[in-house]
Image (spheres, coloured by chain):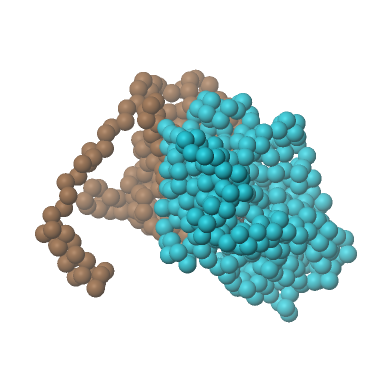
Amino acid sequence: MSDYDAIVVGAGNAGSAAAITMASKGLSVLLVDRSDPPGTKNLSGGVLWGNDLAKILPKWQSEAPLERFIQDKKIGFLTEKSSIIIDFKTKIFEENKVGHTVLRSKFDPWLAKKAREAGATVIPGITVESLVKKDGKIIGVEESGDVVTSNVVVLAEGINPRLAIEAGLRPPLQDWEVSVGVKEIIKLSPQKIEDRFNLSSTSGLASEYIMGNLGELNAGAFFYTNKDSISLGIVAPMERLRENGVTHTYDIIEQFKEHPSIAPLIDGGTVAEYGAHMIPEGGLEMVPQLFGDGYMIVGDSAGFGFSNGLVLQGMNYAFLSGILAGEAAVEAKSRNDFSSSSLSTYKRKLDNSYVLKDLRTFKDIRKVTNNKSMYTTYPKMLESILLEMLWERGQPKKKVREILGSCAADLNVGKLKTATDFYYMYRRM
Amino acid sequence: MLKIAVMIKQVPDSQDISIDPVTKTLNRSMARNVVNPPDVNATEAAIQLKDRYGGEITVITMGPPMADTALLQLMGMGADNGVLVTDRVFAGADTWPTGFTLASVADFLGGFDVIFCGEETTDSSTGHVGPGIAEFLDYEQATYVHKVEYENGFLIVVRDIEGAEETIKIGTPAVLTITLNANEPRNPTLKRKIDAYKKGIRLVTNKELQLDPACIGLKGSPTIVKDMKTVPDPIKNPSKPTIEELDKVVSVLIEKGVVK
Ligand SMILES: Cc1cc2nc3c(=O)[nH]c(=O)nc-3n(C[C@H](O)[C@H](O)[C@H](O)COP(=O)(O)OP(=O)(O)OC[C@H]3O[C@@H](n4cnc5c(N)ncnc54)[C@H](O)[C@@H]3O)c2cc1C
Ligand SMILES: Cc1cc2nc3c(=O)[nH]c(=O)nc-3n(C[C@H](O)[C@H](O)[C@H](O)COP(=O)(O)OP(=O)(O)OC[C@H]3O[C@@H](n4cnc5c(N)ncnc54)[C@H](O)[C@@H]3O)c2cc1C
């Protein structure tokens, strides 16, 4: 007899969601996390889309420690001296309130507490050392020489799944599979935030930028408002960072903070927290075998996430994959069969959900986000076009077609290259 | 079999505390709570004593309900029981009612052979509470202890006395306050934490203790904090080291084999 029906390694979004799903259906669940309180060292930019969370915690909007609901969403390009931004403000966001900024150091302990309330045994402050295998089947976990057993282990270790890798359940991470995110939390009074960004006491702003001023790093940036702080940061592919010899991600976040259109927004703020974390960007190609005899892999560990330079999502994929793995475990328990074939329902559920559908739909997105022109040429091109159109310099005006032509010539890009880039962007995004 | 208690307090992690430049008060809002560091050494000392001479260890804290995680952590190291003394009427206590309440709890639990405390806390650092408990209970006491042996009802302890050590023999029951870094505390283990979780924490309120409201909490606190000032950093502009001084540092590092 196993000690538990399920052991969940990691109380991030995915792990806690799985634990809640299983414990609320009566399974005996052990949820272990290395930090105490659980998840306090976790890091996200911080926009949480809560449709999936609502499935297990219908009252999340009133109970969870949320910062501000997203009312204003901006996307744009930064060049050395300019910013070109689309500002999307809609009543629809206000009416639905599903997008919220969160601080993980508050949100994750709350979610783990919900797992405890659902009946899971939640043990923080313990790092699981390894998985225990018997006859090719995962039968539990090991720590300090002690073995704790379960029918199924749900691996929710986050982006660098050491246990899964060491047990041979997935290959080690490759550079191309990840981006590096660097983040700061900057304290700013609610009054200043609300005045500066034209917000109410509960509404918030989420901006994402393509960083045209960081050359071939292919970096994006984010800027989110919390109650009394700003979360901001930079995300860049590991490959690009290495190729360009960037070892101090600190420098690139400074370049974002010092940008002429960003600096005034954080003026008077003080840095309260600083952190760096990897993000899955490998898409479908990095997704490992997701289940086997006695185990399932969820969340970042499975490579679930979506980013296209303007949107960065992982928490919702983590919730949903955790919930689906939880459901698969509940069904496996009813059959009293935790073999690979029994747990394959997890994969089937994923296939039918947006988790794997999105990864399939956007399987070529890296060709767009990896395209250096997206970051080096096009932001500058946009800037030139807008300067030509909007800056009166006492010179004869040109037609758009002429402007485009001369910009392309200035920036040394062929019309064909531009045309194909935009064609593929149109096909792949 | 020794009956052992460890008194522990949750404090804000000193790494996360900053001083608000405007109000000059401690900003604890971003701080995680941790077990007061010397209290972890006290727990380790208690476990070592139990390992050698046998016994049962109860960790006790007076604090808010969420302090139970601190007790689970120390039970994960090897303490047997956890007691959380929590009640609104205990809130706002200074060192006098804290010592009084904890002494009363020890009495309520049938008394102990040895009560371990930390030398002082990182958030208030008075060092009053341990000796206070000893006085209220009329136990023997030894402060700033880093080594403990037990022999026929007596404790042989080594005390730090600023630059020297003092070895003394005291009777039991006794209160010992343990210094920071007196030992290397073991890590909690998963198995022990699971056992602790299953066993649960015993809650004690003033319903059970029946202490006089005038002697506990804010009401029972004779101290009034009137003002708090931040002392400027004494070495704001340290003079730059000379080349000769740097050479000296480097030669010492080479000598010790730290650099080649
Ligand atoms: C800079 C940045 C910005 C982001 N912005 C957003 C955003 O705005 N919106 C969004 O939806 N997503 C965002 N993401 C992605 C999102 O953070 C992740 O996709 C999400 O956190 C994944 O959840 P998870 O539960 O899989 O992993 P995690 O949240 O990383 O949780 C893993 C947990 O496992 C624990 N753990 C690991 N190993 C062990 C072990 N051996 N023993 C015990 N415990 C262990 C860890 O302590 C941790 O709590 C961002 C990510 C980054 C880095
Ligand atoms: C800004 C500020 C100023 C203060 N000023 C004063 C003051 O001037 N005078 C005053 O009397 N109080 C003061 N207090 C209150 C004081 O912090 C509390 O009385 C506290 O409960 C005990 O004192 P201590 O933290 O100094 O403990 P110490 O006496 O330093 O603690 C020694 C050991 O006693 C044990 N212990 C202490 N508290 C507990 C507990 N709650 N539960 C279990 N074991 C415990 C631990 O083993 C600890 O290592 C102040 C508090 C603040 C925040």
- Percent x, y for residue A177? 60, 65
Residue at the (48%, 39%) spot, across then down: A395
Left or right: residue A321 compared with residue B82: right
Residue at the (70%, 50%) spot, across then down: A316
Name the residue nearer the viewer: A214 or A327.
A214
Residue at the (48%, 20%) spot, across then down: B219
- Percent x, y for residue A61? 71, 36
How many numbered marks, from 0 up?
Answer: 0
Name the residue nearer the viewer: B172 or A147.
A147
Name the residue nearer the viewer: B159 or B174.
B159
B190 is higher (above) or lower (below) than B217: below
Residue at the (26%, 69%) spot, across then down: B258
Instruction: Give me the chain that's cyan.
Output: A
Residue A170 makes an appearance in the image: yes
A140 is higher (above) or lower (below) than A113: below
- Percent x, y for residue B108? 55, 36
- Percent x, y for residue A322? 73, 55
Name the residue nearer the viewer: A83 or B226.
A83
Instruction: Give me the chain that's brown.
Output: B
Left or right: residue A409 compared with residue A309: left
